[in-house]
């Protein structure tokens, strides 16, 4: 008899229910299986109606984020064996409206990401030589923040985001910093106008959970605090030296 | 699509859970966070007690002595021991977060977190020594 | 930041060591310290900082911890109001110190 483990999955079928409920499934316990493999087993053999997102199954696309036993994780990177004896609770990412079963609506994040202009902003013409040169030191300044895979685990971990959905959130700020600190970028002032509002960086109270759950070691909490320092200095400069060209 | 638009055949109602009032008790890291924030009350109390002591200093020998006797009451001493614990928590959590907020590059290389941390603890030591020197004398 | 660096030593010395008799900070010495306007200004700054530090953090703790969003204006007014009031009291005490 193959060993098995129970998965308790949060189901939500909006056509027939007004509230989510639990459904238990018994799946084989294989040494090399992740939670995602268990979900795929459920979908293939036990219950084809289960809805969830996944893609690369190797921790680079950011699609498969879910709450497993109350912690936001990438289901493709979480071993079943590590969660024994079970039952293993699988729920959709916190902080986002649930469309169906384990699928959350991420439109809010996408809008916020767009608002911080996650691209190189230049005021002048394109570089004549065809590319902008950058030293390894200049790359090192922002490389950590470029590792973000938009998996939204940080939003699920952030209590402030669930309490105040207008908060722009950890990943958006970390990605803004990725561009602010890029030597090729000249858009830091435009991003400052968006981020230095109340729902920008100032809603953050440095709980620090976002950094704890990030699978790519982006350290969004650090990015936010550094930005708070930069924004404060910028504010003082604008008061004390209003004529200085930004 | 707005989550509160109600049920329609091809746009069913999206579910949003209500955050429980004691959300901060649900996960230990959240409880640690709220405890850390509550130490700000200890900071305010410390500032006000200092103010009270200064005021008593100016009110004459007798008033000041009664203030000192109040400080010596066992209940007050026990409370101030708890205050010391809270104030220490406040300081230690603050200093430990410094390396995350202060990333300084010198000559193309990032100053290691350990150095930033050590610098802050050193500053704490120096400040404490200065306070002791001021209050207790040479 | 300032309060974080100074408070532990202050609490440990003034309100635990001295009452227990482990250290001595006689009244005359403390009055001597308060004589200069610079030290009074520093103390005023210290008290103000600790009050507003509390006001800011406590306000957000109530806002997020107890989800009192609808009372946001009231909480802000009360916390910063108390801080301002006590700052004025501190100013008065330090100004009129003999």
Image: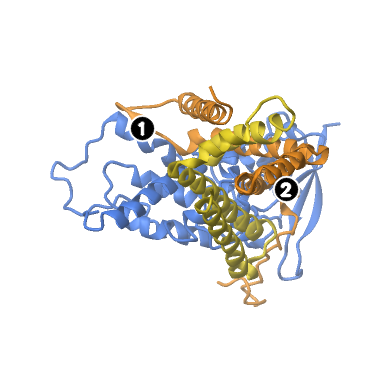
Examine the rendered structure and indicate whether residue A16 appears above or below residue A235: below
Colour given to chain A in the rendered image: blue
| Left or right of B116 in this view: A38 | right
Point 38% across, 33% down: residue: B104
Question: How many other residues sit within 10 Å of disc 2, few (<14), some (14-19) or many (≥20)?
Answer: many
Q: Give the label, 2 or 1, closer to the camera.
A: 1
Q: Which chain is orange?
A: B
Q: How far across and down, in percent of the image, does residue A174 sit?
A: 45, 46
| Left or right of A29 in this view: A155 | left
Point 64% across, 31% down: residue: C13
Examine the rendered structure and indicate whether residue A16 appears above or below residue C3: below
Q: Nearer the viewer, residue C26 or A205?
A: C26
Query: Is residue B61 in sight in this rendering?
Result: yes
Q: How far across and down, in percent of the image, does residue A111 sit?
A: 46, 62
Q: Nearer the viewer, residue A27 or B126?
A: B126
Q: Which mark is residue A90?
A: 2
Examine the rendered structure and indicate whether residue B58 appears above or below residue C33: below
Q: Nearer the viewer, residue B95 or A240?
A: A240
Question: In the image, are marks 2 and 1 on the same chain?
Answer: yes
Question: How many other residues sit within 10 Å of disc 1, few (<14), some (14-19) or many (≥20)?
Answer: some
For label 1, the SS is: helix
Q: Which mark is residue A140?
A: 1
| Left or right of A246 in this view: A97 | right
Q: Which chain is yellow?
A: C
The quarter of the displayed image where residue B18 is located = bottom right
């Amino acid at each position: 008899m193959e060993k098995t483990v129970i998965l308790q999955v949060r189901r939500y079928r909006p056509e027939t229910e007004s509230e989510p409920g639990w459904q238990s499934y018994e799946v084989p316990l294989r040494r090399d299986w992740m939670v995602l493999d268990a979900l795929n087993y459920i979908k293939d053999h036990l219950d084809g109606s289960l809805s969830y997102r996944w893609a690369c199954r190797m921790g680079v696309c950011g699609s498969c984020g879910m709450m497993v036993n109350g912690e936001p994780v990438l289901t493709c990177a979480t071993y079943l064996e590590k969660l024994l004896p079970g039952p293993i609770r699988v729920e959709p990412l916190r902080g986002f409206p649930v469309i169906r079963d384990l699928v959350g609506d991420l439109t809010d994040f996408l809008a916020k990401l767009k608002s911080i202009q996650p691209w190189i902003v230049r005021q002048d013409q394109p570089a004549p030589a065809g590319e902008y040169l950058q030293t390894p030191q200049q790359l090192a300044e922002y490389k950590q923040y470029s590792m973000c895979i938009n998996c939204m685990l940080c939003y699920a971990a952030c209590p402030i985001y669930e309490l105040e959905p207008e908060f722009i959130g950890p990943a958006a700020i970390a990605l803004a910093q990725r561009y602010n600190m890029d030597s090729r970028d000249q858009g830091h002032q435009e991003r400052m106008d968006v981020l230095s509002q109340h729902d920008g960086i100032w809603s953050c109270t440095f709980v620090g959970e976002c950094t704890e759950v990030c699978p790519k070691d982006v350290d969004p909490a650090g990015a936010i605090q550094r930005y708070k320092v930069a924004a404060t200095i910028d504010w003082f400069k604008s008061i004390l030296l209003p004529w200085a060209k930004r | 699509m707005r989550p509160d638009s109600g049920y329609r055949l091809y746009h069913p109602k999206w579910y949003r859970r209500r955050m429980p009032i004691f959300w901060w008790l649900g996960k230990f890291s959240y409880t640690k966070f709220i405890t850390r924030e509550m130490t700000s009350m200890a900071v305010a109390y410390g500032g006000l007690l200092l103010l009270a002591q200064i005021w008593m200093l100016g009110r004459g020998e007798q008033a000041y002595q009664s203030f000192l006797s109040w400080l010596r009451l066992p209940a007050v001493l026990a409370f101030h021991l708890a205050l010391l614990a809270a104030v220490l928590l406040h300081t230690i959590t603050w200093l430990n977060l410094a390396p995350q907020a202060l990333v300084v590059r010198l000559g193309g290389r990032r100053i290691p977190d350990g150095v930033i941390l050590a610098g802050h603890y050193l500053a704490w030591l120096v400040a404490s020594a200065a306070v002791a020197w001021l209050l207790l004398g040479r | 930041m300032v309060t974080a660096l100074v408070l532990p030593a202050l609490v440990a010395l003034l309100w635990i060591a001295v009452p227990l008799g482990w250290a001595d900070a006689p009244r005359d010495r403390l009055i001597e310290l308060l004589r200069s306007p610079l030290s009074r200004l520093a103390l005023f700054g210290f008290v103000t900082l600790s009050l507003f530090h509390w006001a800011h953090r406590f306000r957000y703790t109530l806002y997020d911890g107890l989800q009192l969003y609808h009372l946001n204006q009231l909480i802000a007014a009360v916390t910063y109001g108390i801080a301002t009031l006590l700052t004025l009291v501190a100013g008065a005490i330090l100004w009129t110190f003999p």
